[in-house]
Image (tube, rainbow, N blue to C red):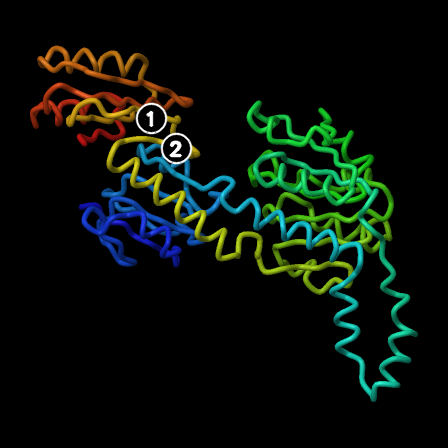
Amino acid sequence: MFDILTLNAISPRGLARLPKDRFRISSDAAAPDAIMVRSFNLHEREIPPSVRAIGRAGAGVNNIPVEKMTARGIPVFNAPGANANAVKELVLAGLILGCRHLCQAWAFARGLEGDDAALNKAVEAGKKQFVGSEISGRTLGVVGLGAIGRNVANAGLALGMHVIGFDPGLTVEGAAQLSPGVRRVDALEDLTKEAEFLTVHVPLSASTRHLIGADQIAALPKGAVVLNFAREGIIDEAAVVAALDAGHLTSYVSDFPVNLTRHHPKCVTLPHLGASTEEAEENCAVMVADQIRDYLEDGHVHNSVNFPEVRLARTTPHRIVCATSGVQGAGGRLSDALKNAGLGIDAMVNVSRGPLTYFVADLDAAPAEALVRELAGGEGVLTFRTL
């Protein structure tokens, strides 16, 4: 029986992927085998020694101490692409909000007083201040062409926009899912000089903090609209406000309210609604639940941000999994130790990601407890399990 600790409300559809005869789910498990979260900040919580895996029912993992978990041999799973459609749809809404000044116009209309004749007169007198622009035929710059960025870029084309994409880390598989109508550039400055609408879709890290700063904003065409539905911190909001006040930018639409922008008349800030749809929450929960189950039961790794991708079809009932770090040839020594103990290896995989090596093997017999203790205590061994 595996104990799963949930620290946020996880979609019941996702939790249903964990059979009750094999998994016990609670919000107060003292010694859980795995933790499932959405927004809960695990940086501020002690992770019990019993934990073997952590799943984030979403794409970003900023709320999880990934480096610490890697040092303990704990894979961190996420759900890339599961909320891509939800975020894409909100970005499309943001495009319209930003160029048609809908939120400001709505607030104006709600503040009108008088009878219908007075309202009509006030509307005709005041609507000129909300004159906007259309998006068809305009240029959309998409920074980051992962699952969400690709969806946004392809949707922009469908709306009649010219689309430029920038992502130096775009994979071959990702490129294949991108419409050929999206023009890709090799430098951010090649995108900013043309983008009348700029949207970012990259994770927040040391290298992406203030990726869009004063220089990049100054390079945008006058009247540009900037959108941030990725993470607070990727765009330098002080530089954005300065550009709004100077009349260089038309508007800023963000999913992350901060005091600098939330009351600004040219800013629209939303309460982190990107993945807040029933469909996205279900998709993320299902994906992460499947990954955690696959790892706990069979040692498979899929969509981990810190472990290598591993899948090995079971060939015997006796499987071992082992994660090591900083030890050259650890997999070879492990297989030698098994052979020296008289155990045959029926199938095996040994994959590395950075300094971490992950080893999965199916044996012709169950290893003795003494051997398990010996292998688990070997040099550089972070985790060792028999399945």
Identify the residue at horizontal 83%, vertical 55% (top origin): 245
Identify the residue at horizontal 27%, vertical 16% (top origin): 330
For this view, does 330 lie left or right of residue 83?
left
Q: Nearer the viewer, residue 263 or 222?
A: 222
Tag 1 and tag 2, C-beta contact below 8 Å: yes
User: Circle 1 sits on which residue?
Assistant: 311
Q: Quadrant of residue 155?
A: top right
Identify the residue at horizontal 23%, vertical 21% (top origin): 361
Percent x, y for residue 210? 66, 41
Give the numbered dot on residue 383.
none
Q: Earlier in the sequence, mark 1 or mark 2?
A: 2
User: Circle 2 sits on which residue?
Assistant: 302
Q: Nearer the viewer, residue 127 or 67?
A: 127
Q: Secondary structure at mark 1?
A: loop
For this view, does 232 lie left or right of residue 245?
left
Three-letter residue code for mark 2: His
Percent x, y for residue 256? 61, 55
Q: Quadrant of residue 218?
A: top right
**Marks 1/2: CA distance?**
8 Å
Q: Residue furthest front?
A: 158
Q: Secondary structure at mark 2?
A: loop
How busy is the neighbourhood of tag 1: few (under 14 within 10 Å), some, or many (20 plus)? some
Say which quadrant the C terminus sits in: top left
Q: How many marks?
A: 2
Q: Nearer the viewer, residue 78 or 66?
A: 78
Three-letter residue code for mark 1: Arg
For this view, does 113 lie left or right of residue 367?
right
Percent x, y for residue 93? 68, 55
Percent x, y for residue 278? 48, 57
For this view, does 244 lie left or right of residue 90?
right
How busy is the neighbourhood of tag 2: few (under 14 within 10 Å), some, or many (20 plus)? many
Q: Residue furthest bottom?
A: 115
